[in-house]
Image: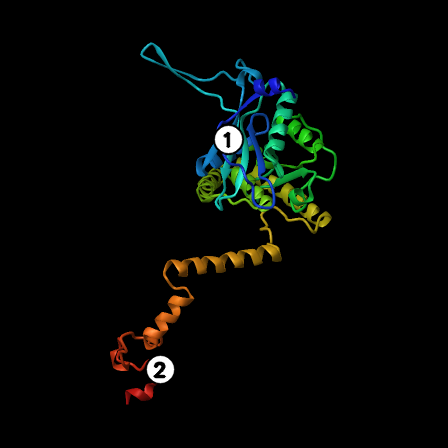
Amino acid sequence: MTSEDKRQMYELEYPAPAVDGGASSGPTLIIAMQGYADAGHAVEGAAGHLKAALDSRTVATFNNDELIDYRSRRPMVTMSEHEITDMESIELDMRVLRDSKGTSFLLLSGPEPDLRWEAFSKSVADLADHFNVDKVISLYSAPMGAPHTRPLVVSAHGNDRELVGPMFTYDGMVSMPGAAAVMIERELHARGHRVAGYTAHVPHYVSASPYPQAVFQLLQSISDTSKLQFPLRSIEQDVARVELQLAQQTRDSEEIAQVVHQLEQHYDREMESYRKQNPQKMMPGEAQVPSGEEIGEAFENFLAAIDDRDRGRGLGPAAEDQMWEHDPQAELDPYGDHAGPDDSPNGDSPSGNDNDKD
């Protein structure tokens, strides 16, 4: 794309915020555009949660007049006392966020463009090159014949074994309507980027309503493969609330209960067949087992946190030596102030020996 085309398509923020994915690699780019493939509002919910829960700054804003057909998604207008007081804004942008550990990553979110998909895809790929993006994960959500009473499936596709390997995948050929995010994936793949797409399988009978379980599983899947850490406790609370509502509705309707039972039987057969064909894959609902390297890193972080805490309390090696020189008996005496056995709460010997009572 020419410089003029880029200026028409998007505008970079100035001064630009720092974007650094870590010492060894560039940032991860998450693509979460709501539109066609957003059953249960899972993609929109995932993007909204990240922007609400984490610090973020805009790095690039896309030109709505180039990409949006306002007749197909008319913005809401607020009128008060015979005057127009507000109009809903349409925000399609790329932001830099920091996860719970402080690691930077990029998020492309907003409505899926109606127009100029090819130019838009090239623009996003140019931004990925500009920010030295290491890996790209696109989020999707589709209505499926799955019961809410079984672990939600997140299927993966892509060109990178690390991003796709351990997850649920389809081995056959599948045809489906395209999306702008898919076109971005193709462009990034052609440029040599590591690319993956994750699709949440939402029970079709709840696909029109917000389904927090899909939001949670999409974000958890990103965390499992990218090592980004997200605050998910508030979503877990929403998950529990919706599960309780669905359980109540299922108990109250014999017809719904029969449909759910049939879906459960189908789900169980499919998962059993998939497990036999892919014994090495992680099944839906199974926690990913950390590698030896990850366990070692977690242990090192734990020891470092203890050292930081002790230094904050003045309990480093030098301070510890001073403390022993000052009064070593105070550290050894379980009663403090050199109290004797008779000063224990029950007047018992600290050794617990009954002979001292005679």
- Please tell me which residue is depicted at 52% across the width and 43% down the height of the picture: 103
| Residue highlighted by disc 1 | 16
| Residue highlighted by disc 2 | 351
Q: Quadrant of the C terminus?
A: bottom left
Residue 206 visible at all: no
- Label 2, residues with CA under 10 Å away: few <14, some 14-19, many ≥20: few
Q: How many marks?
A: 2
Closer to us: mark 1 or mark 2? 1
Q: What kind of element bears circle 2?
A: loop
Question: Above or below — where is 180 with respect to 320?
Answer: above
Query: Percent position (x, y) of residue 354?
Result: 33, 86
Which mark is on residue 86? none
- Please tell me which residue is depicted at 60% across the width and 31% down the height of the picture: 130
- Please tell me which residue is depicted at 38% across the width and 66% down the height of the picture: 319
Q: Earlier in the sequence, mark 1 or mark 2?
A: 1
Which of 236/185 is in front?
185
Query: Percent position (x, y) of residue 342?
Result: 25, 81
Which of 293/209 is in front?
293
- Please tell me which residue is depicted at 44% across the width and 38% down the height of the picture: 53
Query: Percent position (x, y) of residue 162?
Result: 66, 45
Residue placed farthest to the right in the image? 172
Q: Amino acid at mark 2?
A: Ser
Q: Is residue 137 left or right of residue 276?
A: left
Q: Quadrant of residue 119?
A: top right
Mark 1 and mark 2: span between their CA atoms?
67 Å
Question: Above or below — where is 150 with respect to 7?
Answer: below
Q: Quadrant of residue 105?
A: top right
Q: Quadrant of residue 183?
A: top right
Q: Quadrant of the N terminus?
A: top right
Q: What kind of element bears circle 1?
A: loop
Query: Percent position (x, y) of residue 206?
Result: 53, 33
